[in-house]
Amino acid sequence: MSNSRLLWSSMTITAAIALSACSQPANEATDTNADAPAADAAGKTIRIATEGAYPPFNYTNADGSLAGFDIDVANALCAQMQAKCEIVAQDWDGIIPGLLAQKYDAVVAGMSITPERQEKVDFTEPYFANTMVWLTDTNSSFNPVAMKNLTLGGQRSTTPGAYLQENYEGKDGNTVQLYDNYDNAYLDLKSGRSDAVLAEKVSAKSWLADNTEGFGIVGDEIDNDDNIAIAVRKNDSLRDDFNKALSEIRSNGELARLEQENFGQ
């Protein structure tokens, strides 16, 4: 599953034709394209949850406001649907339970489509595709093709976390340490309490931008068909509304522009 380049352009997602703290103030979208609103969503307020702790997909500014690629995508979709967008932060472990409890209508939080999640929620078409990379101290002897007796970090309830547990937990003397968020995983890497962190490439590069000295990406990228999409409750017609709006912002170039602004590629 290695040696694959990150699919930055949303046009390359093969399955797509048309998307990880405290509650934050609402973020209301402005209407940038009123030509083809989704009929069911037009005029409504759509409450959307994000993690607010997964840059550059979503993060919380010093003033408490939410920002990042997910927030920009959510606002663009709500504008396309002529709906009001209210975005709130929710801890990752509780984000799907909160959706099922009807605390909000959708999750836009860099969430990967997995069979386990599909048992609980419905997903839109993907709005991004990602790969995973190893982050480590570049002065260490870490070798991703010969790992023994290492402590490997990741985030709980994520695609990299599941990959670590499946492939390394209890094997060849390796230990997997999963955290509530990647900030804590990176702290343990910097302090030497872990040997490497497995993260999605976009998140890893964002962290490295502020932690360049002594740390880097090592080895090949891991391509595991990690498609990111919006989660809604089962059989919710909002899924169709999102898919229609997603198709529009993809075809008119808005989605590609947001990728460029947030990821720089």
Image (cartoon, rainbow, N blue to C red):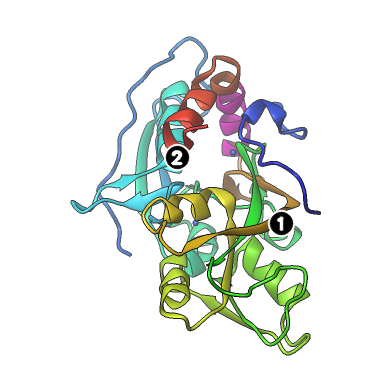
Instruction: Determine the secondary structure under disc 2.
Output: helix
Q: How many labels does the image show?
A: 2
User: Callout 1 environment at 10 Å: few (<14), some (14 to 19), or many (20+)?
Assistant: some
User: Callout 2 environment at 10 Å: few (<14), some (14 to 19), or many (20+)?
Assistant: many
Q: Position of residue 190 (x, y in %)?
A: 42, 73
Disc 1 marks which amino acid?
Answer: Thr
Q: Is the magenta stretch mostly helix, strand or loop?
A: helix
Point 67% across, 25% down: residue: 11
What range is drawn magenta here? 238-247
Residue 69 shows which numbered tag? 2
Q: Residue furthest top?
A: 35
- Viewer-nearest residue: 234 or 231: 231
Magenta-span inclusion, residue 246: yes
Label 1, label 2: how many angstroms apart (C-alpha)? 21 Å
Q: Name the N-terminal-most of marks 1 and 2.
A: 2
Disc 2 marks which amino acid?
Answer: Phe
Residue 87 lies in what quarter of the image?
top left
Magenta-span inclusion, residue 212: no
Q: Position of residue 153 (x, y in %)?
A: 56, 74
Q: Nearer the viewer, mark 1 or mark 2?
A: 2
Q: In this view, does 152 lie above or below 244?
A: below
Instruction: Determine the secondary structure under disc 1.
Output: loop
According to the picture, the residue beneath numbered tag 1 turns out to be: 114
Point 59% across, 68% down: residue: 157
